[in-house]
Image (tube, rainbow, N blue to C red):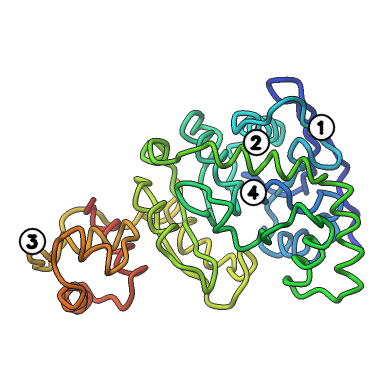
Amino acid sequence: MEPMPPVRYATAQDQARIAYMQWPGESPPFLALYTAGSPPLAYKAKGPGYARWWKRFAMGRSWAMFDWRGTAASSPITGELANDHLEWDIEAVVEAITGPVDVAAVGRACIPLFTLASRRPELFRSLWVVPHGVRYDASLDIRLRPGWEANYREHLRHLWLGFGATPAESERTARIWEEAVPKESLAAYLRAAAQVDLHPVLPRVEIPTWVTVRTGEESGPAAEVAALLPNATLATGERGGVITEFTRDDWEAHLGRRLPGNSAPAPSGQPSVALTDRESEVLLLIATGKRNPDIAEILTISTRTVENHIANIYAKIGVHNRVEAANWTREHGLR
């Protein structure tokens, strides 16, 4: 078995020590940002759904993971945690592993990533994100069981069962997880996430971004994120999972070809198809993640009329669903 790299420490602005591991390889490195409150670095470094998958995905490039403050080997949370502190954790690790980096971020990790990227874009080459939406709402978080505070370990055990683990493995993981991420840390992460509104932030993030949607989830929140980003594409998974359902070929198709030194970016400019004014309005609303009833209300037309417009739009621009329509809109510079 390949030896794990040593645990190293990056120092954040407030002197918090952030534990990270960097696997050797070519530059630029990948950085995996799992949501704050996920299993600890020591566990991920051995897990097939984490380190082994990243080794295959990286294909000879360097990559890294870390523990957020309040998790396992990193400094504990002191005082009230804010999104700024989580920004500093990312910033310290990127500087330590000699960025700029290509990031893959899941869930709540997207929030400090976007706010940091708006402030220090030079740290990043590209962003691959699986976001909750423009605002975090714990009541809509499918990974957070209602009443999780009452029996934290049981919550973690059920969560790991949902990832396909055996009951015995889920029980063992829950014990490790609970020790590494105390209930108080998870509560602090949730409070910090709930304080951030990304509406004014996302338009300032011009870094090439690939927004993906968890299979089976409503695409609206992710589509809204993608619509606010100046340089984003949107895609849904087909095989289940979050990041691991995608391959390096997927990444190259959606991001690699858009980075310096690779092939030309997606075309922009005015579309060559003839959309009516009303069809253009409907298309733009689709691209912002609006559902048919929302569009009907905004435009003061019936839902059936919206459906007819969408059918005509799809036929004219050659797409088959809302995600493809949203991507077409961005690629042709319609905003």
| Quarter location, residue 316 | bottom left
Disc 1 vs disc 4: which is toward the camera?
Answer: 1
Q: Which residue is mark 1?
A: 76
Mark 4 residue crowding within 10 angstroms, few (<14) / some (14–19) / many (20+): many
CA separation, marks 3 and 1? 55 Å
Q: Are marks 2 and 4 in contact (CB under 8 Å)?
A: no
Callout 2: SS: helix
| Quarter location, residue 143 | bottom right
Residue at 43% across, 57% down: 221
CA separation, marks 4 and 3? 43 Å
Mark 3: amino acid: Asp
First along the sequence among labels 1 and 4: 4
Residue sitting nearer the eye, 9 or 1: 9
Mark 1 residue crowding within 10 angstroms, few (<14) / some (14–19) / many (20+): some
Residue sitting nearer the eye, 146 or 160: 146
Q: Position of residue 213 (x, y in %)?
A: 50, 64
Disc 2 vs disc 4: which is toward the camera?
Answer: 2
CA separation, marks 1 and 4? 26 Å
